[in-house]
Structures are given as structure tokens and as C-alpha cells.
Image (cartoon, rainbow, N blue to C red):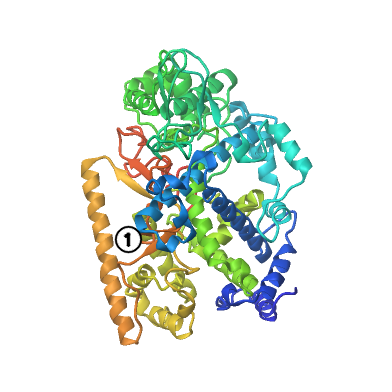
């Protein structure tokens, strides 16, 4: 099937006039299409033009990415709805003797039963994801290793400046993902590979091809007390369908459950997730001391996210702030970390706090000479930043990666499900939509460049283009560094209030720069955001015309195509997390700011409602915002917050971070300005852990 005539004309216009406003989204929906039309569309996206090396984002690459997201969603539903998988049966939520006949007509089930069923389905998926992250680690470890050494960072060699091109990073870094996805996923979104591919996987990883067929036990690191190896179950939540015993809790104490606990088979010591995190940390420390492997968080410059060669040997290298964590471990902490080893990362944090509070120790580590020993010495800001960056790699993360992949997948799943429900893939205007969102994404990156110290927040359509660009990591890296002068990361976590206020700012700037509404959505939240920035002095000047822009949005008919529950230009909030402030004074301040933000949204909603009423329009109610997940309704009080359905007992909490000193996940005293939290710190332009630049999404 050829491209629709309208899409061709839009593409030609976009190519001939790069400064022209992006075309509007097409109103045609897949639900109005005949089976023959759907077949033609399937044929169209089965022959997408996806290059082996992508220098930029294209419509076809975005569509190939959507195919991947649809495949993920199809897999998720297949796993979640597989009754009895890992002995988690739907029958446990029904009264004895009533069976599961109600499943044939879920509309007749009460909301409580629907939510209990949704928890069972989410539990199956959470276990699948936890096992998938472990299988990914096995695949990663199958590649030959050529670890980066501290000495490599002192030399102008490709091993450091191009370390991402070396094994094992080389494969995912250099190979473009979209072409591979496009070849492996059929038009029904099934992932199909050859028998040889399956055999190679099993031989390379020593794992079964099918996740569900892998062993249900996991060998964990040696017991910290006696050194014995232990095998633990992935979950303790399963039970035989005909069991007469009370069903076990969905929290569980298995390796993939929310509250991992196991007794050492040799000495009886209770093993929890804390010791797994410490084992990762002490392993990295051993590799630093024995093999000169730099600690995580000390390889890239924290402000630009790029490599930066160490100074020549001498005083400058001895006090180089990025490598301070390596020095403090080598010259002081090493003796404090082994006899006995810390029981948790919280103890590691306390040890670091003690050392940082001793100025004499810091002077020795920093090679302060005798004549300056009596002078006051303050540790540099970058040194403190890199201590935080190092520690952030271990909070809630026992994997060899900088990010805990299971939680990242679950958060990313929020975005995936929204893309699935929008269903751009089956729209006759699919390419037109992709062309428009790519142009909007380019504008978004222009805003990041223009305001490097601000946080720009994408809408869902912009975020699709952004995610797609990152699927070609080498091209994305080159593009961002060339355009911005720094590497722009995609923050995995950001506090919900910060996300909301930054989205307001992004909407304001976009409308001022391009004369168009940024959040083309008619939900109560987006309706409330628009008056916030249209009431500024600048918006009253003829040059901006914000009210005219908003009126055009409604009068042109575009607003009618953006229903509150299914808008393509809604805020993208899959990385939203709740920040728990442990300092009482700061907590009071943050609570007050939160209430002020809520009050401002409420006031602006009232303004928008009155303005709409004058023009004969009705806004959606502010208090009714339900999201259906696994067939159960969940009330969301705002679209920018972490979803309530993610905060359930089937897995450890992936939506909360701690702030302030003295608590799990918090910064070590002396390293933080007081506004950062685990997984959301690092002192970079975006304030994001491991992130650089001014954007989140």
C-alpha cells in the first residue's frame, strides 16, 4: 500500500519549509476502519523503510518503535492473563465454591474483585519482568570483557574516549534497534525468530528461550556471615489451585518479590535485599583496589555527560574532583568496609559521612601538604556530586547496571500502555502524525538548547520521538553533543510536583516561541496549565497572542480530536515519583509548596471553566479521573503523579525516593545541597542522577 496522498503532501511541505508549523493530527481513527483497511495498514507497516544506520529520527523509525511497544504490551497482557502462571491462580480471589465463571463477563464483577484480579495479573507480570532483568544480565555477561581502567582515563586513547564502542557495550551501542525489531515482529506483534537464534541464545546464556521455562530458583551471592551459597525461589506467592490452605500474600519473600527474605542454609542468617546491594558495592571496591576499575559514577564528567581526560600526573590529578570517590576508598575507606562488611548501604552511607566530616582525613586523601594542613579545607562541589553519583548506583539496585532494570521497565510500561491505547500505528494518518511529532520534538530540543539550566518536560507525542531517537544510542549521542555541547540524558525519576511545574514552564515557552498550544489536550489539568502561562504580562502583548493561540486550538477543531482520556499531547509522566522528605523542616516547606501548587491549579481551572462557559464549552470535571488497569478502575487525582496502580504490594516500591540525610536512599551528609534523592540526584543541569542537560521524560 502506498502512502496516503495527504501524508505525501504533508511530507513534501515539511521538507520544503522547515520553519512551517507542524500539521495538525488527523482525525481518522482505526476504530472506523474496515478489516480490509486494517489489512492494508498492516501490510504498509510491515514494509517500513528502516535504515541500518539512522542519522536522525524518521517517521518509519517511529512506527517501527511503535511496533516494538505494541509487542511489549501484547506480551504483558499474555503474561498477566495466563491463569496459573507460577501457580498464581485467578480462583484465589473468588469465594470458595463459586469458581471463576465470573471471568467470562468481567462487567458483572464488583470493583473490589476486579482490583484483586488486577493485582494477580500485575504480580505475574512483575515476576516476569524481574526474571527478564536477570536474563538480560546473563546475556550481558556472555560477552567478552575489556574493562575500563583508571589509567585509561588518563590517556588520550580510544579505549576511554570511545569506551562505549568496546565490548560488551559495543553491541547495544552500535547496532540500531529499530531495524532488528522491524524484522523480528510480525503484523500481529508476535516476536518471531529462527530455531537457530533460539539455540544460540540458550547455548550462550545457559537459559531457556522462554522466560516461563527457566528455573524457578535463583542462586544468590555468598552469605556474608559464613560464605555459603544459597538457592532461593523466585517467589513464595504461588499455591496449588486445589490447596485448602489460606492463599499466600502477594508481597512474597522470593528473589523477585517485594520483600525478599531467605535463611542461609548453613548458618541460618536472614538474608535480605540489603546484603545484595552491599555485595555489589564491595565487589566494585575489590575491583577498584585489585584491578584499577574505576567506581561507578566516576567515569563521565557530571556536567556534560561526556568523557574528560584526567590531568597529567601531579597535584591536579591528585585532587581531580571526579575521581575523589576512588581516592577516598583507596586511601581510607578500604579498611572500614571489610571487617566486618557493612550490613546495608545505609551503613556504608554512615561510614562515608563519618569520613567526610573529618577534615584531617580529607586533607590526607587530597594530599594536602604539611604547610597547608592547618588551613581550612573544603571539599569541592564536583567531588561531592560524584560521591552522590556513586552511591546512587547501589540504592535499591544489586544488578551490575547503573539503573535497576526491573523498576525502569515497570515505569516505562506506563508510557508503553499509553502508546498502545492511542494506537497511532493503525491510523491512516500514522505517517502524518509521526512527521508532526518529530517536528515538535526538534522544537523541544531547541528549547533545551536555549534554556540549558531549565527542566523541559515532553508531551506524549514528543516523548515518542525522544525515546525513538535514543534507540539509536550512538546517533543520539552524536546528535545531542553536536547540538547542545553536552549529552542530554532522559531522567528516569523526577518528583511529581517538579514535573508539573516544569511542564507548565515548557508549555509557556513553547507557546511563546512557536505561537501554538503545546499541550493539545482537553483534560482538566492541561486546561488548568494553559491559563497559568497566558496570564503573564508577555502574553498580553500582540507579539505573543497566547489567548489567540488558545482560541485557534478550539475554533480549528483540533481540541475536539484531543479527548481528556486519550490525548496524544498530554503530559508524559511515566517517570513521576513521590519524594519523601525526611527532614521535618524541609518537609513542612515542601508540603506548603505542594499545597500552593495545588491551589494555583484549582484557581486556574476555575478561570478556564468560566472562560470556556462564556464561549459555550464545558470542561471535564476536575475530580473524576479514572484509569483502567488490568480491567480495574483506579482513581488518579492528577495526571502528573505516579499512578496509584503502581504502588501495590506485588513488588518493591519503584515510585518513591527519599530526600534528606540519615535515611535509606538519602545522600550522605556533606555531599548534598538538600534537594536531591536516591535515583534523582547527581547535581547535573537537570538535577538527575546520571543525567545531564535540562530535560526529563
448 to the left or right of 293? left
Residue at image location 49% in from the left, 74% down from the top: 514
Q: Where does residue 508 sit, x and y in percent of width and height?
A: 40, 69
Q: Is residue 643 visible?
A: no
| Label 1 sits on residue | 637
Q: Is residue 572 above or below residue 38?
A: above
Nearer to the camera, 334 or 34: 34
Q: Is residue 443 above or below residue 686?
A: below
Looking at this rendering, what residue extends furthest in the right direction? 196
Residue at image location 50% in from the left, 15% down from the top: 228
Nearer to the camera, 89 or 435: 89
**What crowding class fits label 1: few (fewer than 14 Cα within 10 Å), some (14-19), or many (20 or more)?**
some
* Residue 1 falls in image quadrant: bottom right
Secondary structure, mark 1, is loop
* Residue 661 falls in image quadrant: top left
Q: Where does residue 539 sit, x and y in percent of width and height?
A: 37, 76
Q: Is residue 46 above or below residue 521?
A: above
Q: Where does residue 11 sit, x and y in percent of width and height?
A: 67, 75
Q: Tally the numbered discs.
A: 1
Q: Is residue 386 visible?
A: yes
Q: Where does residue 540 sit, x and y in percent of width and height?
A: 35, 79
Nearer to the camera, 180 or 267: 267
Residue at image location 48% in from the left, 83% down from the top: 557
Q: Is residue 260 above or below residue 525?
A: above
Amino acid at each position: 500500500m502506498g502512502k496516503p496522498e495527504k501524508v505525501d503532501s504533508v511530507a513534501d511541505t515539511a521538507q520544503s519549509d522547515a520553519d512551517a508549523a507542524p500539521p495538525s493530527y488527523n482525525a481518522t481513527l482505526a476504530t472506523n476502519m474496515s478489516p480490509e483497511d486494517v489489512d492494508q495498514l498492516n501490510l504498509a507497516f510491515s514494509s517500513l523503510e528502516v535504515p541500518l544506520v539512522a542519522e536522525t529520527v524518521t517517521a518509519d523509525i517511529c512506527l517501527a518503535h511503535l511496533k516494538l511497544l505494541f509487542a511489549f504490551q501484547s506480551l504483558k497482557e499474555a503474561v498477566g492473563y495466563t491463569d496459573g502462571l507460577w501457580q498464581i491462580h485467578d480462583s484465589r480471589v473468588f469465594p470458595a465454591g463459586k469458581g471463576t465463571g465470573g471471568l467470562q463477563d468481567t462487567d458483572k464483577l464488583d470493583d473490589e474483585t476486579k482490583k484483586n484480579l488486577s493485582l494477580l495479573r500485575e504480580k505475574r507480570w512483575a515476576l516476569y519482568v524481574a526474571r527478564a532483568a536477570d536474563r538480560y544480565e546473563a546475556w550481558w555477561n556472555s560477552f567478552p570483557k575489556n574493562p575500563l581502567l583508571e589509567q585509561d582515563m588518563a590517556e588520550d586513547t580510544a579505549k576511554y574516549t570511545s569506551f562505549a564502542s568496546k565490548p560488551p557495550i559495543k553491541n547495544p551501542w552500535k547496532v540500531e534497534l529499530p531495524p532488528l525489531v522491524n524484522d523480528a515482529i510480525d503484523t500481529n506483534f508476535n516476536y518471531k525468530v529462527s530455531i537457530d537464534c533460539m539455540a544460540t541464545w540458550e547455548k550462550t546464556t545457559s537459559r531457556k528461550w522462554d522466560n516461563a521455562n527457566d528455573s524457578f530458583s535463583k542462586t544468590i551471592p555468598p552469605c556474608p556471615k559464613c560464605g555459603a551459597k544459597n538457592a532461593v525461589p523466585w517467589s513464595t506467592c504461588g499455591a496449588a489451585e486445589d490447596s485448602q490452605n489460606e492463599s499466600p500474600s502477594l508481597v512474597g519473600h522470593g528473589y523477585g518479590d517485594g520483600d525478599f527474605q531467605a535463611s542461609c542454609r548453613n548458618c541460618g542468617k536472614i538474608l535480605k535485599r540489603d546484603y545484595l546491594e552491599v555485595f555489589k558495592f564491595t565487589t566494585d571496591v575489590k575491583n577498584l583496589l585489585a584491578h584499577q576499575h574505576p567506581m561507578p559514577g566516576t567515569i563521565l564528567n557530571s556536567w556534560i555527560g561526556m568523557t574528560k581526560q584526567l590531568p597529567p600526573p601531579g597535584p591536579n590529578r591528585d585532587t581531580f574532583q571526579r575521581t575523589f570517590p576512588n581516592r577516598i576508598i583507596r586511601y581510607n575507606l578500604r579498611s572500614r568496609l571489610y571487617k566486618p562488611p557493612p550490613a546495608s548501604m545505609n551503613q556504608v552511607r554512615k561510614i562515608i559521612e563519618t569520613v567526610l566530616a573529618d577534615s584531617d582525613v580529607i586533607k590526607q586523601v587530597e594530599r594536602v601538604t604539611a604547610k597547608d594542613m592547618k588551613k581550612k579545607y573544603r571539599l569541592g562541589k564536583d567531588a561531592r556530586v560524584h560521591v552522590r553519583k556513586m552511591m546512587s548506583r547501589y540504592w535499591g539496585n544489586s544488578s551490575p547496571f547503573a539503573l535497576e532494570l526491573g523498576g525502569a521497565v515497570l515505569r516505562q510500561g506506563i508510557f508503553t500502555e499509553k502508546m498502545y491505547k492511542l494506537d497511532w500505528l493503525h491510523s491512516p494518518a500514522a505517517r502524518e502524525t509521526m512527521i508532526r511529532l518529530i517536528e515538535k520534538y526538534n522544537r523541544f530540543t531547541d528549547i533545551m538548547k536555549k534554556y540549558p539550566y531549565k527542566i523541559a518536560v515532553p508531551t506524549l507525542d514528543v516523548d515518542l520521538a525522544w525515546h525513538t531517537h535514543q534507540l539509536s544510542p550512538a546517533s543520539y549521542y552524536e546528535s545531542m553533543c553536536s547540538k547542545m555541547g553536552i549529552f542530554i540524558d532522559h531522567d528516569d525519576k523526577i518528583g511529581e510536583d517538579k514535573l508539573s511545574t516544569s511542564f507548565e514552564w515548557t508549555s509557556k515557552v513553547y507557546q511563546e516561541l512557536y505561537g501554538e498550544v503545546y499541550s493539545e489536550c482537553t483534560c482538566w489539568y492541561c486546561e488548568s496549565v494553559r491559563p497559568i502561562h497566558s496570564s503573564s504580562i508577555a502574553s498580553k502583548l500582540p507579539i505573543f497572542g497566547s489567548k489567540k493561540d488558545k482560541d485557534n486550538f478550539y475554533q480549528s477543531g483540533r481540541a475536539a480530536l484531543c479527548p481528556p482520556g486519550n490525548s496524544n499531547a498530554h503530559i508524559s509522566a511515566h517517570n513521576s515519583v513521590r519524594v519523601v522528605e525526611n527532614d521535618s523542616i524541609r518537609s513542612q516547606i515542601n508540603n506548603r509548596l505542594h499545597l500552593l501548587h495545588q491551589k494555583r491549579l484549582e484557581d486556574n481551572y476555575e478561570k478556564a471553566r468560566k472562560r470556556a462557559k462564556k464561549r459555550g464549552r464545558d470542561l471535564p470535571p476536575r475530580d473524576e479521573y479514572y484509569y483502567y488497569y488490568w480491567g480495574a478502575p483506579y482513581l488518579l487525582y492528577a495526571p502528573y503523579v505516579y499512578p496509584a496502580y503502581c504502588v501495590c504490594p506485588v513488588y518493591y516500591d519503584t515510585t518513591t525516593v527519599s530526600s534528606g540525610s540519615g535515611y535509606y536512599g538519602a545522600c550522605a551528609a556533606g555531599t548534598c545541597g538538600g534537594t536531591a534523592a536516591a535515583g534523582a540526584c547527581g547535581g547535573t543541569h537537570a538535577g538527575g542522577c546520571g543525567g545531564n542537560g535540562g530535560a526529563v521524560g
